Amino acid sequence: MKIAAYRLIFLAGLIALWWLASTMVERNLVPSPWATLLAARQLIAEGRLGGALLDSISIYLGGYAIAILVGIPIGLIMGTMRTLGKTLEIFVYALSATPRVAFIPLIIVFLGLGAQAKILIIFLGAVMPILINTYAGAQNADQELIEMARSVGARRRRIFGSIILPGAVPFILVGLRVGATIGLINTVVAELYTAVKGLGGLLAIYGNTFRMAEYFVIVLTLAMIGVIVTEALRFLETRLGRWRRSDVVV
Amino acid sequence: MIVSNAPLQHGTTGGPETAPHRIVLDGVCKTFGAGDKAAGTVALKDVNLSVRDKSFISLLGPSGCGKTTILRIVNGLIKPDSGKVLISGAEPRPGPNMGFVFQSFRLIPWSTIRGNIEFALVESIKDKAERQERADRYIDLVGLSRFANAYPSELSGGMRQRVALARALATEPDILLMDEPFASIDAQTRELMQLELMRLWSARQSVALFVTHSVDEAILLADQVVLMGPRPGRILEVIDVGLERPRWKYDIRAEKRFIELRAYLWDRIRTLVLTDPESDFYGRDLGNGS
Ligand SMILES: Nc1ncnc2c1ncn2[C@@H]1O[C@H](COP(=O)(O)OP(=O)(O)OP(=O)(O)O)[C@@H](O)[C@H]1O
Ligand SMILES: [Mg+2]
């Protein structure tokens, strides 16, 4: 609980700095916290923030969910089938090193500017860290535990279910967290590049028209989504990691 | 000298002379890590060993002489490069019929102690309640009832080793393979566990292969002590202990036979370690018991 207090103090410090910046920077490029709050109230009252949020979150969660459904199974298969994994990994690494925003024009050509294109862009961003971390987790399975399981007569299916998969969970969760962050980034990117909608759309509108208070509201909303998603995943991590000693930092 | 067998070609060990051979190793060789260029480590070279039913065998020898490798081959976890292995007349196959206490406990960190023991019972006991009952009985046997719901990370090293022992015992196997099962248990608990193991073994009369670095422990528990040497790993000698059972009924350490055996084995091992050019302690002057 001490931590919560320190965090609040730090937050207060940040807001103070923000306020200071708003008084010093010229041309009203930085809105004051108070102006931002007023803008937020107005945006909420007009229903614009809610609408944009719903737009963004639905494509974000859509793309992210597909990334999970694709990334985890492929990672597990690659990690348990050695030859297949070794064959494919170089292609996976190559693809993950390619900036996937490079595909956006191509995606627009094929899918247009609608939700499908956005979901694909988010999917492409989120799937790689999920896949690669899952792969690493399955590959790093504890060989000694696997041998122990073989010695008590466990077959492949049980070895997978009770040794390899649970052993990979911490890796998978890291992948989910990184994937969630990249997915969020790609949500905004997708909304900026395709049909200007959602939070990314508002960002573009307010940014181009120098309505900085509104602009800040959107940025803060995005930050909030990021915090909520990663904190939820962190919570899941501690729940699933109860077997760890409490003095181990997670 | 009381020790009869000179280096044996075919070490036959066993309790009752009439019992059939439960474990037979015939000309077993195993080399690790031999590649196109690398020569590899010869872990076992031409190992012959026949173990009679209902006998307790201690494997004794310097580090790296292939003790763990023998247990893994007997369990069927790895195959020898050449030679024959027969367990009850058949190919070795891992399963609840053999219990293995690993040198490095190998507990599942995300399972409770009870879960860890039940893990070994899944193949042999289908009924859940019965499985838990059996697990709890063996947790109690190693004195860890209070920790049945704890996770391995909450236990000390010695406690974890006892869980590993309980897991191997719980399937009530015909063959028990134990790789230094008491190495990290404190002296008092160790004596208790040795006693408990002797009791269990004499009640069930299964075959036990017991790896240890402690000469005392090797003699105390076994019908036969198998002395092994390193580089290449091989059996040097099989020695009948010949001390009366049950051994907890008298002070075995005071017996003349025990003292002689102990002195002999110590001497052999010391010579092995000090004359092996690859040993970490080659050529040190520790020879005269000073
Ligand atoms: N998986 C492996 N890969 C490569 N070399 C191995 C492997 N397992 C064992 N060895 C080698 O084989 C030899 C025998 O190993 P083993 O583990 O059987 O020895 P040990 O008698 O059990 O030793 P210790 O008393 O130290 O446990 C050693 O030289 C070891 O380096
Ligand atoms: Mg060993």
Image (cartoon, coloured by chain):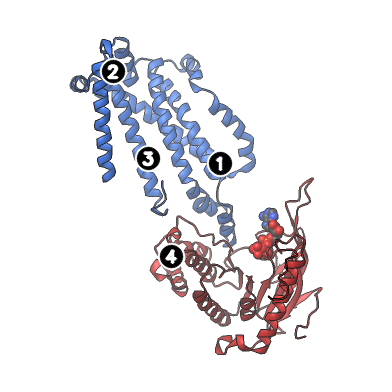
How many angstroms separate mark 4 from mark 1 (CA)? Answer: 31 Å
| Image location of residue B127, percent across then percent down | 45, 66
Tell me which image quadrant ligand 1 sits in. Answer: bottom right
Q: Residue at x 39, y 18 (%)?
A: A114
In the displayed structure, does residue A222 sit left or right of residue B230? left
| Gap in angstroms between the C-alphas marked 4 and 3 | 33 Å
Please give the chain letter of the residue carrying mark 2. Answer: A
Asked whether A27 or A116 is in front, the reply is A27
Mark 4 and mark 3, same subunit? no
Return the residue at label 1: A77
Q: Are marks 2 and 1 on the same chain?
A: yes
Residue underneath mark 4: B128
Asked whether the viewer can see residue A76, the reply is yes
Mark 2 or mark 1: which comes first in sequence? 1
Given the image, on which type of amino acid does mark 1 rest?
Ile
Residue denoted by label 2? A215
Q: Which chain is blue?
A: A
Q: CA distance from mark 4 to mark 2?
A: 60 Å
Q: Horizontal and vertical percent for residue B152? A: 45, 60
Could you tell me if the residues under marks 4 and 2 are in contact, i.e. CB atoms within 8 Å?
Answer: no
Query: How far is disc 3 from disc 2 in space, using C-alphas?
Result: 28 Å
Q: Residues within 10 Å of mark 3 (few under 14, many from 20)?
A: some
Chain B, colour shown: red
